[in-house]
Image (spheres, helix red, strand yellow):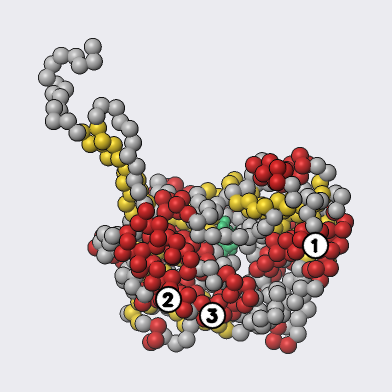
Amino acid sequence: MTATRSQQSDLELDLFIDGAFRKASSHDRSQIHNPATGAHVGSAAKGTADDMRLAVETAAKAFDSGVWSDLDALDRGHILHAIGDALKARLPEFAELETRVTGRPIREMTAQMSRLPEWFYYFGGIARGMEGHVKPFKGGHLNYTQFSPLGVVGLITSWNHPLLIFLKKLAPALAAGNAVVAKPAEIAPLTPLLFAELATQAGLPAGILNIVTGEGSVVGPAMCSAPRMARIDLTGGTETGRRVAGMAAQRLIPATMELGGKAPVLVFDDTPLEEAVNGAAFAGFIASGQTCVAGTRFIVQDTIYEAFIEKLAAKVAGFKIGDPLDRATEMGPVISRKQMETTLDYIESGKSEGARLVTGGARAAMSGDLADGYYVEPTIFADVNPSHRIVREEIFGPVICVMPFTDEKHALQLANDHEFGLGASVWTRNVMRAHRVVKNLNAGIVWINDHHKNDPASIWGGFGSSGYGKENGWNALHEYSKEQNVVVRLTDDFPDWYGGGDRYS
Ligand code: NDP
């Protein structure tokens, strides 16, 4: 049975298949609560493996019909622009809902959401520039390549930036002409579901974007094993990445893995201290530290080490922690009790392993409606040892580690001593040193004198345990396309290979 959202109770959302909301076959639901207050926000259907199979078959039918894949790239681009415009018109609503689901302050969500339409404008624009190549070929042949869509592609996304992460995969997937089945995180599915409805209303043909909510361990394997699934693109933790990459490998389908990180932030002593501290606060505590590129290992020149720690601690102690819907709030809760307990466990491990606790170190005491919220004090550990768990493992909470370095070589050695290779930043006024250091950093995304910045044209992806493949830019469009090589004989005289004689003697 299908329904439009006007027939659904507010934010009690079902699966989105074939252009409409549709009940899951299980009738079970995931309840979504505001992590700041515990208030009920809405619910989403718990899809089953059967639901996932139906979604993939629906997407395959829509793809095969040519309604999207056969459209001229220019016309697909027009629809992507219309989707960008429709999203732009509803940004405040999406920002508020995402704040209620994730607990991230409304000022952060408003800033992040304001950029999202750009992914549709950018990929809507470059889709028509997907040019093949003409290559040399010995023997008077024309030799060229051309691109076509893969078919049905699967997106599996995390809860920390529910809409951003979904849309930065979706825009290139659609621009390339694919049909999509998406599986958002179970605890943050509402904005992706509402977006699917918005995209359909803006002109995306039914069946080209389908969303199956539910538990990753149930619907994820069904997605990866569906015979028509042609590619998997995951953002998630490294363990999930290993499982999903394994399933994709079994099927011999390509995959992109955007996984965990533990970003080093290298601070040289020629950076003005105030700028270094403001940069560190921004790098480490945006989203309460729940981002894959959050600065978590601060590697600070020994000449400014103590001054940096003292000033950063004062800055952090002044954060306005409160109701995420209040525009004055600078820091909200983490997303769930589980995430809070994990973060507090790591804090205890830092204390017991002998790191120096500079500030924070406990659940934040809140009052009134926020008393039961999942708030964790912004926490700084100094004098950490590279073998400490808080240095080695991704915490995904507002906890940072600071350690001193003596010279450039030492800074690089500390930065690269890690399994992850996702984000990093380098702070210095010395342009030669900046580029020299960056070249030797094992990180897929590096900022110089900045952090966190992202753009649809700017490639994004990690090395090592942070995964493989690239989002954004031409790379993403290529990853969502298949390139075919075509060799054309241009002469009339096709030789008779079996006509006797030896042509090559
Ligand atoms: P998880 O790995 O727990 O989940 C990610 C997604 O995978 C969810 O939709 C989840 O579903 C799904 N999933 C879980 N198990 C399976 C399975 N067996 N098969 C298929 N899908 C499955 O990550 P989180 O949601 O907790 O997100 C945090 C992680 O994401 C962090 O490690 C972070 O670093 C990383 N991340 C990486 C980014 C990057 O660009 N590299 C950006 C942002 C985050 P369900 O929700 O139901 O469990």
Asked whether disc 1 touches disc 3, contact meaning CB atoms under 8 Å apart, the reply is: no
Q: Residues within 10 Å of mark 2 (few under 14, many from 20)?
A: some
Q: Residue at the location (80% across, 73% down)?
A: 318
Relative image position of residue 249 (x, y in whole percent): 44, 47
For residue 453, above or below residue 92:
above
Quadrant that contains the N terminus: bottom left
Badge nearest the viewer, 2 or 1: 1
- Which comes sooner in the sequence, label 1 or label 3? 3
Relative image position of residue 208 (x, y in whole percent): 34, 66
Q: Can I make out residue 15 in this image? A: no
CA distance for labels 2 and 1: 40 Å
Q: Which three-letter amino acid code belongs to the residue tagged 1? A: Glu
Query: Which residue is nearer to you in this view: 275 or 185?
Result: 275
Badge nearest the viewer, 1 or 3: 1
Res. 274 mark: 1
CA distance for labels 1 and 3: 33 Å
Instruction: Name the quadrant containing residue 188.
Output: bottom right
- Which comes sooner in the sequence, label 3 or label 2? 2
Read off the residue under disc 2: 86
User: What secondary structure is marked by label 3?
Assistant: helix
Q: Residue furthest left?
A: 499
Q: Which three-letter amino acid code belongs to the residue tagged 3? A: Pro
Relative image position of residue 203 (x, y in whole percent): 33, 73
Is 323 placed left or right of 229 in the picture? right
Quadrant that contains the C terminus: top left
Task: Note whether ligand 1 is within 8 Å of mark 3.
Answer: no
- Which comes sooner in the sequence, label 2 or label 1? 2
